[in-house]
Structures are given as C-alpha cells and as structure tokens.
Image (cartoon, grey):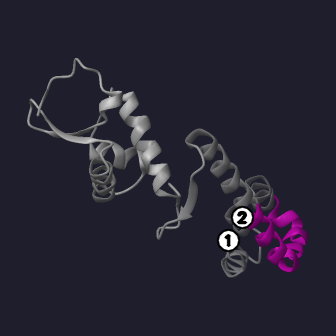
Amino acid sequence: MYSTGIAYLLWLCSGCGVLGLHRFYLGKTGTGLLWMLTGGLGTIGAFYDLFTLPGQVREANIREAIHEESIRRKVEERQGKNSWRNVDDGKFRIIPQEKEKIERVILRLAKENKGILTASELALSANISIEDAKKDLDAMVSKGFAELRVRQSGSLVYTIPDLMDSNEPLVD
C-alpha cells in the first residue's frame, strides 16, 4: 500500500515535486521521467501534484489491488478453489480452505507419484508446514485411506494402495 505521507515527503525532497520522485514512488515512471527532465513541467506540474497527491495515492493503491486480484484469480484457476491469505510479511500465499482440500491435494500428489507420497512433498505442494503435512497424512492413515511404509532405502513414505504401482519395492 502506498502512503500519502511518504508521497508528500518525496514531493518535498525532490524540490517541491520538480524532480518527480513522488511519481516514481507511485509507479508513474513515464511522468516521473518527464518531471525530472522538464523540472516538473516548468513547476506547473509539480504545483498541480501538491493538490492532487492524495488522489494519486488512492489511484495507485487501487491499481495495486487490481493487480493482486488478477494474480490471485490466475493462481486460483490453476490450483482449484483455494483462498489467499495475507501472511505476516505482507505477501499473499495460497492456503487450502478446508481439510477436504488437503485430502484432494494428497490424492492428486499420490496419483502423480504412483500412490507414494512424503510429508515434504505434500508440504511443498500445499504450501503448509511439514508438521501439518505429517498430521494430515497421519489422519489419512488413521482413517484407513493410507498406509505408512518403509522404502528399501529406509525412508518413510505414505502410500495410497488404490493408486499404487505394484512394481514399487517396499518393505512392510
């Protein structure tokens, strides 16, 4: 989100708007360069910005929100019906809405991997912690939909028997 206070501070620091730093801040690179090369259009444009800066900040925030919404929709189309949540660092991440969605992710990954899945694969695909992925996979095991097995290499894997390739060597 753009701030009116920062925009005015940049306006002031750029010679009362003559250098156009506030315009660069608001994503208006073209007019920022124009202001810089022409001295704020002979100070007329810089003076104009003094009164219209709050509206320009609102406009930039709306542009940013539209851009984020566009990205969110594109990702939702690819990922299915998931929600976006704002995480502490100000970035948006996809988070499955319900347990049912996690189960679908588990089944999709298991199908892609011939019935075999690890907690780290699920965590990476569903954008959740490995601990949460392990809990979700253990819940599938407790319901009888999945099994916990050991590969010949000794690593633990979760299997969905209905989706398994019978050629994969596992030890019970």
Please provide the residue range marked out in magenta: 38-62
Q: Is residue 113 visible?
A: no
Comes first in the chain, label 1 or label 2? 1
Residue type indicated by callout 1: Tyr
Q: Is residue 49 magenta?
A: yes
Which of the pair 2/126 is nearer the observer?
126
**Left or right of 44: which side holds 131?**
left
Q: Nearer the viewer, mark 1 or mark 2?
A: 1
Is residue 126 covered in magenta?
A: no
Q: Position of residue 81 (x, y in %)?
A: 60, 49
Residue type, mark 2 in image: Leu
Disc 1 designates what residue?
2
Residue for badge 2:
26
Q: Secondary structure at mark 1?
A: loop
Q: At 77% across and 52% down in the image, what residue appears?
A: 30
- Within-10-Å neighbours for mark 2: few <14, some 14–19, many 20+: many
**Residue 32 screen position, x and y as percent:** 75, 59
Residue 93 vs residue 44: left or right?
Answer: left
Question: Residue sitting at 29 percent across and 31 percent down?
Answer: 161
Question: Which of the two residues, 132 or 36, is positioned nearer the viewer here?
Answer: 132
Residue 66 in view (yes/no): yes
Q: Residue 6 placed where, x, y %?
A: 66, 78
Would you say the residues marked 1 and 2 are in contact, meaning their CB atoms lie under 8 Å apart? yes
CA separation in Å, label 1 and label 2: 7 Å
Give how far across and how far down residue 154 sits, in percent.
8, 37
